[in-house]
Image (spheres, rainbow, N blue to C red):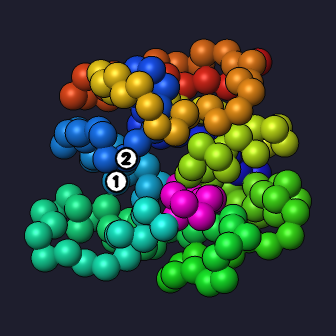
Amino acid sequence: MAKLVFGMNLSLDGYVDHQEFQTGPELFRHWIERVGGVAGSVYGAGMYEIMRYWDEDDPDWDAARREFATAWRNQPKWVVSRSLKSVGPNATLVEGDLGTAVRALKARHDGEIAVSGPTLAQSLTDLGLIDEYRLYLHPVVLGRGTPFFAGPRPRLRLAASDPMGEDVIRLTYVPA
């Protein structure tokens, strides 16, 4: 059975904003390995649309960005959306009850399934389906944006803390 993991970059004050963080080479390498190593990812519509950037090659990309794009394209993706009618390559639109669909994904796969997007993560938290939270804290204070925890805060227990290079700390929590 797969483990469902929600992990994202966030500011010290708890906000997620993909345009506000500088990801250095060491952390970017981690994300390449992470994306290439999971059984797949469950996306909310908004985060999926942001990540579709990696579907098309950009001639200005360096080798690391090309490697990330390849890993992202090869990864199975399940997109939870009421508004999208179709999704791109290697992606499946999740229909029906969210809890039932995600439980089935967890039962069908081994390893880790990444959760992408704080709003989707909140829905999965409310259903008791997230097994682990990974907060990649950047030394930035935003004062605005989308909060990492989009609703009531779950009771958590610290499982690990790891430096990730470039002044980033990964805090790993499990439900208490």
Question: In terms of secondary structure, where does tag 1 sit?
Answer: helix
Image quadrant assignment for residue 151 = top right
Is 46 magenta? The answer is yes
Contact, mark 2 vs mark 1 (Cβ under 8 Å): no
Q: Label 2, on which residue?
A: 18
Q: Position of residue 90 (x, y in %)?
A: 54, 79
Q: Is residue 59 above or below residue 38?
A: below
Which numbered tag is attached to residue 10?
A: none
Q: Position of residue 74 (x, y in %)?
A: 45, 73
The structure residue drawn at horizontal position 34% and vertical position 43%, both measured from the top left corner, is 30
**Residue at position x 48%, y 67% from top?**
49
User: In the structure shown, which secondary structural element does the residue marked by tag 2 occupy?
Assistant: loop
Q: Which mark is residue 32?
A: 1
Residue 104 to residue 17: above or below:
below
Q: Is residue 34 visible?
A: yes
Among the 4 quarters of the image, the one containing residue 6: top right
Q: With respect to residue 90, does 36 lie above or below?
A: above
Q: Position of residue 28 (x, y in %)?
A: 27, 46
Upstream in the sequence, badge 2 or badge 1? 2
- The residues bearing labels 2 and 1 have C-alpha atoms spaced at a distance of 16 Å
Specify the amino acid type for callout 2: His
The magenta span reads 38-48
Looking at the rendered structure, the kind of residue marked 1 is Ile
Q: Quadrant of the C terminus?
A: top right
